[in-house]
Amino acid sequence: MKLLGLFERQIPGDDALLELARLRFSQANLGAEMHAGAPEELERMLLFRPASPSKGKASPRPVPRELPVTAHLARDFVLPESLPRILAFAARFAGRIYGMTLHDHADLAARPAYYLEAARELDRGLARIPNRPWLFIEYAAGIDLGAYRSFLESTRDLAQVSACVDVGHVGIWRACQAFAERHPGLDARALKRAPKQAQALMADLEAAVGESLPAVLELIAGLGSLGKPVHFHLHDGHPLSNFSPYGVADHLSFLAELPLGFDHVGRRTAPLMFGPAGLARIVRQALEALGPDRVSFTLEIHPTAERLPLDSEAARLFGHWVDKTNAERMNHWLAMLVENQSLLLRAARQTARQ
């Protein structure tokens, strides 16, 4: 089982932020998923690759051990047009990264044979590269989940191409679909801009959100038959969330709750799609369906505006900063990733004991 976290500079500042990320990831023994739109961008990010000290039997001195890295390719990588760019990435970073994540596209559902042939051509190209990374096609475009499952079945014979299950994307899609079944023509996510209507429909919305976890578990249950590794993006969410500056309703911590601008059943917060208990069920389902050797998890959680003071080791990285606000925001984000990593590890240990 490989554990990774979102490793990038989403908070303004210089390379001291990436040095802090390397420090915290190394301390937590957490690998890194790095976004990249060009090979040069990934080369630069790899300069900050986290490493975990390990003691060898021959020497008591700690020896740095590089932690796994996956490359999250930019959204403008689309099959089949971007096939040469993807293969160039794979060849350049062969033996240095574990995998590459590629967003799916509407053509996967609208033109399945066309998209499948592009995936086959990509698989053939990857097979010619020694020590090639895996290519994981992520559920990201909001297509029908049945179409995505059918595509995965059709790629069973592809040896280098597999799936990236983004549990937040799957959960949001199913919650919105279930809500639309109760209220045709109404997008659950639009209710965040209509608090009075959201309050009136909150019971139906919570029932729809309750269908997110079963949809994720059902998808994972069928992945074991593929017989190859599967990558996961882990984060929570809710159709009413307006936290993200990117306009998405997910990428939240599993420890968070949704603030409401109104009272609902005596509370002003609502649970998210999964929470810690839902994460535990997702981890258990993945490990049981696939086995630990074929599972990799990335905690793809975005930062908040909260701050956490720097300890002395981290403070040394920011001696040239006068205003430490963004350093403390980065420190909080990294601490949040590690807290969610602890939840994940606990779930994995519980699964192993069963």
Image (cartoon, rainbow, N blue to C red):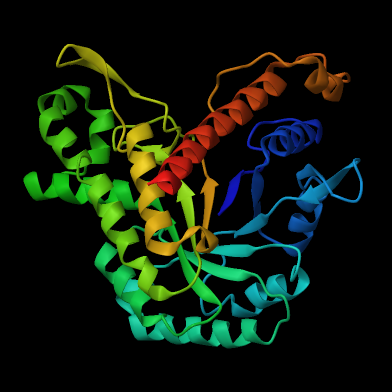
In this view of the protein, which residue sits in the foreground, 296 or 74? 296
* Residue 293 vertical position relative to residue 311 in the rendered view, above or below: below
**Where residue 308 sits: x, y (%)?**
63, 16
Q: Going 73% across and 81% down the picture, which residue do you hit?
A: 130
Q: How many marks?
A: 0
Q: Quadrant of residue 204?
A: top left
Residue 308 falls left or right of residue 341: right
Q: Going 84% across and 49% down the picture, which residue do you hit?
A: 56
Q: Going 40% across and 74% down the picture, which residue do you hit?
A: 226
Residue 211 falls left or right of residue 142: left
Can the viewer see residue 288 in this picture? yes
**Where residue 38 sits: x, y (%)?**
71, 62
In this view of the protein, which residue sits in the foreground, 166 or 263? 166
Residue 130 falls left or right of residue 154: right
**Where residue 334 sits: x, y (%)?**
63, 30
* Residue 267 vertical position relative to residue 253 in the rendered view, above or below: above
Can the viewer see residue 185 in this picture? no
In this view of the protein, which residue sits in the foreground, 312 or 302? 312
Picture quarter with the N terminus: bottom right
**Where residue 282 sits: x, y (%)?**
36, 48
* Residue 300 vertical position relative to residue 321 in the rendered view, above or below: below
